[in-house]
Image (cartoon, rainbow, N blue to C red):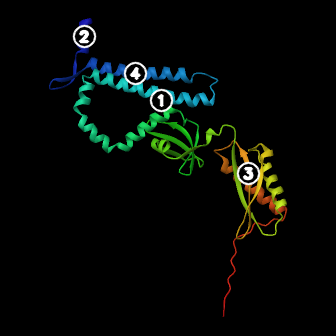
Amino acid sequence: MMEKLSKFLDFQIFHVGDYSIKVHTVLSVAVIFLVTKFIIWLIKKALFGKKKLGLFDQKNISGLFQIIKYIIWVISISLIFEAIGVNVTVLLAGSAALLVGIGMGLQQTFNDFISGVILLIEGSTKVGDVLEIDGEVIKIEEIGLRTSTGLSRNDIVMIIPNHLITTNKVINWSHQIKKTRFSVDVGVAYGSDPELIFKVLKESVFEHKAVIDKNSIEPRFVNFGNSSLDFEVLFFSKNVFTIERTKSDIRKAIYKNFAKNNITIPFPQMDVYLKK
């Protein structure tokens, strides 16, 4: 029985020159692959298995899991190469010149890989954070080794190269732990009563449920514009990612309340004089 098993394991599936692939080689590769998948599954269950896991813990554990997963796969791939008879050390030494050429051609890709490692280790940006990159507000859904996936305010999935997050000027709105201050601008016709404007602006913002710290609502007289008296109203909110929807609701409330109080929102006008 053992002799038959030994012959089966030594059976050559593929043969070229001095190199051959036998049944036991294929089985070794399959075992390494399955064991790797099982270990990653166990680690994932162990890290995310807690029922009461806070949002802060989830963000940190997600980054830790990504790093562990990549390390395990690197070790696994090295073992697979060894199992099929490829000496990884010799392979790397022999292809050093080729790797330098590839590295120069894929410089930006390697930059993204290094940026991904920095993001996962440093933890300054985590899954669930709301970032503003190049004027676009994005909620991070996943941080990968080369790219990260985000969701825009218009529910569009965006693939972001990691170097944009680590090298560009990025605003992380999620670091505003308690609340963030926002403003809505509006212009009114000359001759309007500023005190009445202040009262209406404050009431319009006060109505919205997403506005917190109601006592901190602050109307301001900003400027004497070309066609209007310019005002702004400042308020605090926790809903950073959906703040544009909140601002839209507040603008609608302002417009409605201005109409009730006979307050006019002017449009630019120009007088043209013709000389004969």
Furthest toward the top, the residue is 1
Residue type marked 1: Gln
What whole-number distance in Å separates the C-alpha atoms at marks 3 and 4? Answer: 57 Å
What whole-number distance in Å separates the C-alpha atoms at marks 3 and 2? Answer: 79 Å
- Which dot, 2 or 1, sits closer to the camera? 1
Position of residue 10 relative to residue 119, above or below, is: above
Residue type marked 3: Leu
Residue type marked 4: Leu
What whole-number distance in Å separates the C-alpha atoms at marks 1 and 4? Answer: 19 Å
Q: What element carries label 4?
A: helix
Residue type marked 2: Ser
Residue assigned mark 4? 34
Tell me if 9 is positioned left or right of 251 in this view.
Answer: left
Considering only order in the chain, which callout, 2 or 3, is on the residue closer to the N terminus? 2
Q: Tags 3 and 2 in contact by the CB under 8 Å rule? A: no
Q: Is mark 2 on a helix, strand or loop?
A: helix
What whole-number distance in Å separates the C-alpha atoms at marks 2 and 4? Answer: 23 Å
- Which dot, 3 or 4, sits closer to the camera? 3
- Which dot, 2 or 4, sits closer to the camera? 4
Measured from the top left, where is residue 230 in percent x and y? Answer: 73, 63
Residue assigned mark 2? 6
Q: Nearer the viewer, residue 271 or 156?
A: 271
What whole-number distance in Å separates the C-alpha atoms at marks 3 and 1? Answer: 40 Å
Q: Which of 53 and 135 is in front in this view?
A: 135
- Which dot, 3 or 1, sits closer to the camera? 3
Q: Residue at x 57, y 22 (%)?
A: 49
Measured from the top left, where is residue 175 in percent x and y? Answer: 62, 38
Q: Residues within 10 Å of mark 4 (few under 14, many from 20)?
A: few
Q: What element carries label 1?
A: helix
Q: Which residue is drawn at 46% across and 23% down?
A: 40
Residue assigned mark 1? 66
Q: Tags 3 and 1 in contact by the CB under 8 Å rule? A: no
